Image (tube, grey):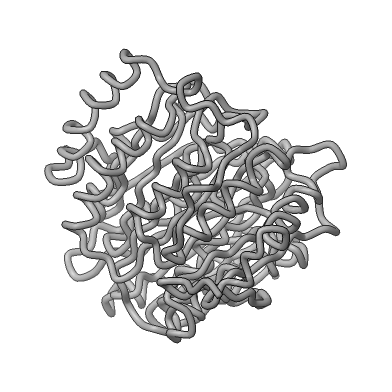
Amino acid sequence: MLKAASSLGVIFFPAFDWAISPTHPEREERLLYTQDQFREEGLFDIDGIDEYRPLFATNEDIMRAHFCFPSVEAICTESHRISAGGAIQAARLVLEQKTRRAFALVRPPGHHAMKVVHGNRGFCNINIEAVMVEWIREHYGRKRIAIVDTDCHHGDGTQDVYWHDPDVLFISLHQDGRTLYPGSGFPHENGGPRALGKTINIPLPPQTSDEGYLYAIENVVLPILEHFKPDLIINSAGQDNHYSDPITNMQFSAQGYAKLNELLKPDIAVLEGGYSIKGALPYVNLGICLAMAGCDYSAVREPDYNAAALRETPETMDFIKNSCPHLLEGYFHPPMGHFEKQGEFFIRERKIYYDTDAILEKQREELKDCDQCRGLRLIKTSSSHLLPCLGVELPIDCCPACEREGYEFYHQSSKKDYLVVQLLDQKNKQFTYRPKQ
């Protein structure tokens, strides 16, 4: 019997009873062929690779990561809770040392869900990696965590959740946002005033193939990880960068993705996008599992794979090679961005469009410039569907002054013109909301 060099827990939740629509790319049968491939190839016959059932994310699990308006129940279906619970199960297996690594093969995905959630954007309702990360920190204390997002689309939601968090390094490799949704993920997006350099964006030209992706991994991602020294590495493992994906323009292969995971050595991987249901997902997921388990993946090939035909042009490789030194510089010597400030608070105002649910959100974020902690954060938000709501966040290292001020906002603002006021108190582990009275 074959034996895995590193034990691997696989959590599988295909959510066959949930879809955005019967013909939508994110639909029920998305993982059907992957399930069949695992059985046919005997993945679970390998000693050390085992399948586990997902857990179920509670309201508190979700509220550690998000402000959900008007409520968690209005945002999440049972499938979203189980998908997030699958990610939590992956973390539990690794942190309790039941397996060396874990891969949550779950849907619906989550990396476009931001700190504030009014509905579905980019096929995502809640950020399953963020729910998992906050569960880890709730149960195992403060940790340095690196999230490497290899989905073809920029992980703008995960970036937003950890924009102000210096303990979480977020790296996103994605197709250039000038050519693909969500139109973001540029190198100058490098973190908020409390976490400069802890967001790294690596936009890659359309038609980038294995060579370009792996060059960026070896010459940007790995040196940054070596310096950051995370306690955990999480691969936000979108697979829509595959050459057969119907909604993107990249040329990545199953072999490339397996090699990426061999280099990255993630403790946990969580499935994100990937919509080539028959041509990519079965092969890519099998390659990832074998690579994470330290098994030979050299025989994993798509039937139509042709490395020479997929290879990027010399001009594309030159562009990637010339970009990498500047991207490294953005981590080691991050330029100070322009942060608007009014009194004691940094201000960020923006409009966010929820493309799936056709919701337009207007948001004002206020972060206190405190010299004793990361600062109290207030998020005032309204949408085309909801009256104004308020989120009050107290950071894990919250000082007494910010704590008092935060609770004053929470209790007093609920009497004002807000439909809902939600409290996210990371320091005292209090997560609650109050509707308008």
Classify residue 400 by image quadrant: bottom left
Asked whether the viewer can see residue 42, the reply is yes
How many numbered discs sit on the rendered protein? 0
Residue sitting nearer the eye, 128 or 403: 128
| Left or right of 365 on screen, residue 2 | right
Which residue occupies 66% across, 74% down? 54
Q: Quadrant of the C terminus?
A: bottom right
Which residue occupies 72% across, 58% down? 40
- Relative image position of residue 327 (x, y in whole percent): 23, 35
201 shown above or below 75: above
Which residue occupies 46% across, 52% down? 158
- Relative image position of residue 378 (x, y in whole percent): 43, 58
Residue sitting nearer the eye, 308 or 207: 308
Tell which residue pokes out farthest to the front in this image.
1
- Relative image position of residue 160 (x, y in whole percent): 44, 49
Which residue occupies 70% across, 49% down? 386
| Left or right of 278 on screen, residue 323 | left
- Relative image position of residue 141 (x, y in whole percent): 35, 82
Classify residue 368 by image quadrant: bottom left
Tell which residue pokes out farthest to the left in this image.
333
Q: Quadrant of the N terminus?
A: bottom right
Asked whether the viewer can see residue 58, the reply is no
Residue sitting nearer the eye, 23 or 401: 23
